Image (cartoon, rainbow, N blue to C red):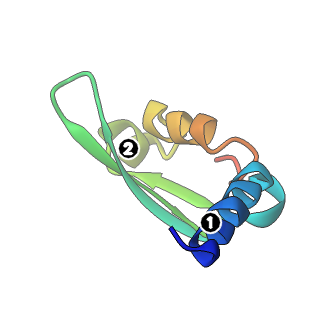
């Protein structure tokens, strides 16, 4: 492996460690597998969360799928309201 590649790998480690200061999510789409043999599409766009599950669609409230992604992305995205 060449020196340039090693340098890039080391730099990526620093960025990952400093993620809350260096990385801002603007948009994100994820699929979350639920307990009921289905999956749901969760989207984050400019601070707004949506999910295609019936709970989020009918009540316009934060669902478990959104909450799970918020936990994974702690301090990296705005929390759903």
Q: What element carries label 2?
A: helix
Q: Which of marks 2 and 1 is nearer the N terminus?
A: 1
Label 1 neighbour load within 10 Å: few <14, some 14-19, many 20+: few
Q: Where is residue 81? Give x, y as percent.
A: 67, 46
Residue at image position (61%, 34%) is 71
Q: Which residue lies furthest to the front in this view?
A: 2
Residue at image position (73%, 61%) is 15
Residue at image position (69%, 55%) is 13
* 27 left or right of 7 in image: left
Residue occupied by mark 1: 6
Residue occupied by mark 2: 58
Asked whether residue 24 appears in the rendered view, the answer is: no
Q: Which mark is residue 42?
A: none
- The reply to whether discs 2 and 1 touch (Cβ–Cβ < 8 Å) is no
* 32 left or right of 25 in image: left
Q: What element carries label 1?
A: helix
Instruction: Please tell me whether residue 30 is drawn above or below residue 6 in the rendered image.
Output: above
Q: Nearer the viewer, residue 59 or 53?
A: 53
Instruction: Please tell me whether residue 58 is drawn above or below residue 28 in the rendered image.
Output: above
Q: Where is residue 60? Give x, y as percent.
A: 49, 47
Q: Which residue lies furthest to the right in this view?
A: 21
């Amino acid at each position: 492996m060449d020196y340039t590649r090693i340098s890039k790998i080391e730099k990526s480690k620093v960025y990952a460690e400093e993620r809350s200061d260096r990385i801002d999510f603007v948009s994100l789409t994820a699929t979350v597998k639920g307990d009921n043999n289905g999956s749901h599409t969760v989207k984050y766009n400019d601070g707004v969360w949506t999910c295609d599950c019936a709970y989020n669609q009918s009540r316009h409230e934060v669902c478990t799928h959104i909450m799970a992604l918020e936990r994974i992305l702690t301090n990296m995205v705005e929390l759903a309201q």
